[in-house]
Structures are given as structure tokens and as C-alpha cells.
Amino acid sequence: MQDSQSAFRCLLHLFLFTGTFSAAVFPAHADETKTVWGLKAGDRFVVSLLSVKHTEVTIGDQPATSSDTRDRFEIEYRVTQVRNSGDAVIAAKIRKASRDVGEASQDSLKASARSARALEDLRIGFEIDSTGQILTITARDRDAVLVALSGLDVSTSQLLRDSCPDDVIAAWLSRPFWAGLTGQVDELPQGSDQKEKQKSPLTRKDSIAIGPFGVMQTTLELQPNAADKNEESITVTGKGRFVPLVVPNRETISSKIPLQNVTAELDEYSGKILLAQEKPKEETLVPDGDLPELRPEILPHQKDVHFQSMEVNIRMHGSGTLKGPAGSADQNVTFRQTQMQAWILTELAFARSEYFYDVPVPIPAAPR
């Protein structure tokens, strides 16, 4: 029985980390001839991520186990190619990965800090369409993520494959593109004040991996708020649908965990996305000489970049039955988790370009 409980806690602690990889995005339709964000080959940007989680797990009559984590990452995105369809080929790299755990956390969770450091400089290539949905990610890069998280342990790597679907890893990278399309507006009669037009909500999908329990599939509504002089923002709300974990009948840790009658509910999914405000063109003239690789401000007349930052708060709980060995009673298992995630655009650089006969010719950005 102790072995089953240890395996269960191991998998649950791992889902605390893999929960970071949890954003399956299916944006609304867009003009397929344009890339998301209007990105061009050679463009580069960096998004900083902070993920804070608190989880309580109770098995039978045992005292509740509390786990606290604080994960930090930077993801550097470089556009290497833009196809005629509007799809963009992007090379992403994980930077400055770290994990802090609370003193009361289990030893297995404290050991996961080494897995976080293993993500440093990990490179992932993917292709994303004009709506912000990742189309492809190579199996090699996907496996590299799982190997880094598992600390080169084969059984743990298979455990992660069971509890963290492939599309969860790919979609994690697409979160900054959620607000890439914000121009949906309900048309009013001709002559109406522009401010009277109401922007329609956008629909997104998020999948949250919850280890041995399964996946919380969430339908999100992104409602653009009325713009003011200080900020332009989008309110995020979500409703969840629980999908139990299904694993093949094989000799893996997750297959050996006799967890039955599992269920989970989403108590809260709320957040806010801040958009980059477009400045008047006369305020964004490009100075003479080469454009620096990194500018602290966005040049809207060159790029239509919307995303500035995003913060989401998630609360959920679940329960199941941990089946005991022969002669032992089954035990009830419950968990509660709260998490906060903050995504912030910290660096932005455009590929330099020159114009011959009004035809743009891209020039690679200056080396760092």
C-alpha cells in the first residue's frame, strides 16, 4: 500500500510542474494571409513566466500534505520563416528556468528543482498559424522536454507521457498569442461613433494537466474591455470539463496506481490580458541609423503587436479512490489546488529592413 501511495504522490507532485505546460489554444478564424501578430522573419521577442501553485492532498485518514512551488522561466521566440499561407516557423528557447519549493513540501517535489534547471537552454521548434494555434512540433523536441523534466529517468519519462499529452506541451508555448487577434467588432449603422462599437468576445481552449486524475479541459471567453487612456485590456473567464486519465495497460508507474472513481471540478478560471497601446504615428518615427535590436517601446506603424502581459488565477479540486491491496481497505483521495500564472512581454526586437522601389527586403537582426 505504501508503494502505491508513494507512486501516487510522485505523479501528483510531477503534475505540479507539468501543469505549467497547459494551454491548448483554438482561436477564432482570421485572415490566413497574415501571420499572428504580423510577425516577420527575423523578429524576436521574450516572454517571462511566473507560475505559483499551492496544492493540498489528503489520502485516507492521513494528515493533508501541502506543496508550494514557484516556477520562473523566460521563453525566447525567434521567427525563422514565414510561409505564404501566413504560417510562421518559430524557434523557441527556454531561459533562466528555476523552481523554488516550500519548506513543508515533500522531498520528491524538492528534487524536482533539478528538473527545472535541466530545461535551461532547451530549444523547441514549432509552426504556428495566423490564428495563434500551433500546428506542428517535432517529436524530437517534445521528447527533449519530457527527458529534461524526468531527470533522465526512463520510468518517470513514461509517467509524464501518460499524464501530459503531447498537445499540452506544444500549446504551452502559444499562450502569448491568445490576444493576437483582437479586431473583432460588431458593426453599427453608418455614422455611429467609433467608441459605440462593441468588440465581440474571443473563444479559446485551455487544457490543464492534473496528473493521475486526468485533464481539465476549459473553454475560455476573452471579452475586450472598453479602451481608456491608461490601458486596453481583455477579461478572461472559463468553464471546465473534466476528462479522466486513460493510460495503456503496461508496466509504468501511472498504470500501477490503482486510482478509481476519479473526478475533478474547476472552481475558478479568471484573468486579465493587457494589450500594447498603439501610439500616434507621429510619436513613433524611426530615428536615423540602424534600428537597435531591442527597443523598449512598440512601433505600431511597423508591427501590430497586441500582447503585453497576462495574469490568470485557477482554482480546482478533485477526488478519487485509491484501491488497497488484497486484505486492505480502499482509501479516499482528495486534492485542492490554486495557481497563479503571469506572462509578461519583456523584450521585443524587429528584423531590420531596407526598401528598394518600395519593396521591403528583410535583413537579419544584429547578433546579440
Image (tube, rainbow, N blue to C red):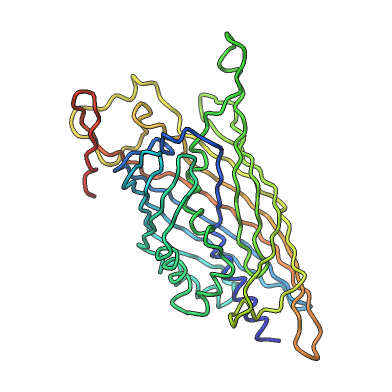
* Image: 310 above or below 290: below
Q: Which quadrant, please, contains the N terminus?
A: bottom right
x%, y% of residue 366? 21, 44
x and y percentages locating residue 20 in the rendered image: 53, 59
Q: Is there any visible trace of residue 21 in the rendered image?
A: no
Q: Residue furthest top?
A: 191
Kindly identify the residue that appears in the image at 45 percent across and 64 percent down: 142
Q: Residue furthest front?
A: 84
Q: Quadrant of residue 69?
A: bottom right
Left or right: residue 200 versus residue 85 is: right
In this picture, residue 209 sits left or right of residue 287: right
Residue at 63% over, 76% down: 9
Residue at (38% x, 64% y) in the render? 120
Horizontal and vertical percent for residue 327? 81, 91
Residue 20 visible: yes
Above or below, 23 against 57 in this view is above
Question: Between residues 105 and 363, which one lies in front from this camera angle?
Answer: 363
Residue lying at 75% horizontally and 70% vertically, measured from the top left: 320
Residue 109 is situated, as x and y percent measured from the top left of the image, at 55, 73
